[in-house]
Structure formats: C-alpha cells, structure tokens
Image: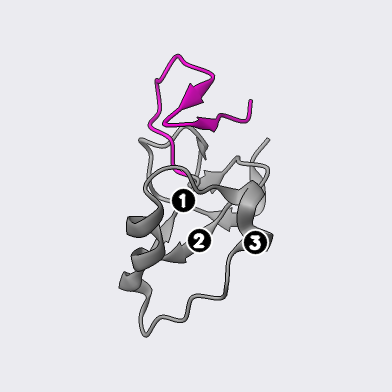
Amino acid sequence: MANKDIRCTVETCHYWANKNYCAADQILVTADSVATDTSHTLNALQASTISPTPVGKCQETCCKTFIEKGKQDAYHEGIKKMQ
C-alpha cells in the first residue's frame, strides 16, 4: 500500500507506486555524507541510532530506503525488502 504522505519520482525503486507514491512502511532520508560513509548497510530501522545530519540544501540528501525494482532477492545489499 502506498504511503499517502510520501511522494517519490524514482520509478526504478522497489517501493515506487503509481502516481509517484512511496509504498515503503518506513523510509530513511539522511545526508549524502552519512550515506557515503555507511555504504548500503544503513536503513530506516536504524534511524533512531543516527545523529542528526544537518545539510544546506536538498541536493545534499539521500533516500537510504531505495532498492532497485526487479531485484528477486528478499535481501538486497544487506537490507531486507519490505513486501
């Protein structure tokens, strides 16, 4: 089911839904610097353990919930896909 409050235009994401909705139960948006430092091991379930990450503009942010659409594995880069 799509999250009615989160919009996303990345149609190649596993969680992308019709009319640009995000269907993930939880998402994690963080600073690009954190995303780079943590590779693909960081996800929404760990959000409460991360320090706040100030940025100056939207281009410095990243959705860590992204999983490429069409991946058959339940796990992708160490992160379990929500069904």
Which numbered circle lies on residue 49?
Answer: 3
Q: Dot 1: within a 10 Å radius of its alpha carbon, few (fewer than 14), some, or many (20 or more) residues? A: many
Which label number is shown at residue 29?
2
Residue name at image x 49 percent, y 75 percent = 53
Q: Nearer the viewer, mark 3 or mark 2?
A: 3
**Vertical position of residue 81 compared to residue 32: above or below:** above
- Quarter-wise, where is residue 33 in the image? bottom left
Indicate the amino acid at tag 1: Lys
Quadrant in the picture for the N terminus? top right
SS class of the residue under badge 3?
Answer: helix
Asked if the residue at tag 2 contacts the one at tag 1, i.e. Cβ–Cβ closer than 8 Å, the answer is yes
The residue sitting at 41% across, 31% down in the picture is 77
Question: Can residue 27 be seen in the rendering of this structure?
Answer: yes
Indicate yes or no whether the magenta region holds residue 6: no
Image quarter hosting the C terminus: top right
User: Residue 44: horizontal and vertical position, in percent?
Assistant: 60, 50
Relative horizontal placement of residue 54, taking residue 45 as reference (left or right)? left
3 or 1: mark nearer the eye = 3
Please say if 33 is above or below 64. Answer: below
Q: Residue furthest bottom?
A: 56
Task: Tell me the number on the disc at residue 64.
Answer: 1
Percent of width and height locating residue 57: 35, 81
Task: Point out the tag, 3 or 1, that comes first from the N-terminus.
Answer: 3
Dominant secondary-structure state across the stretch colored magenta: loop
Instruction: Please tell me whether residue 80 belongs to the stretch shown in magenta.
Output: yes
Q: Residues within 10 Å of mark 3 (few under 14, many from 20)?
A: few
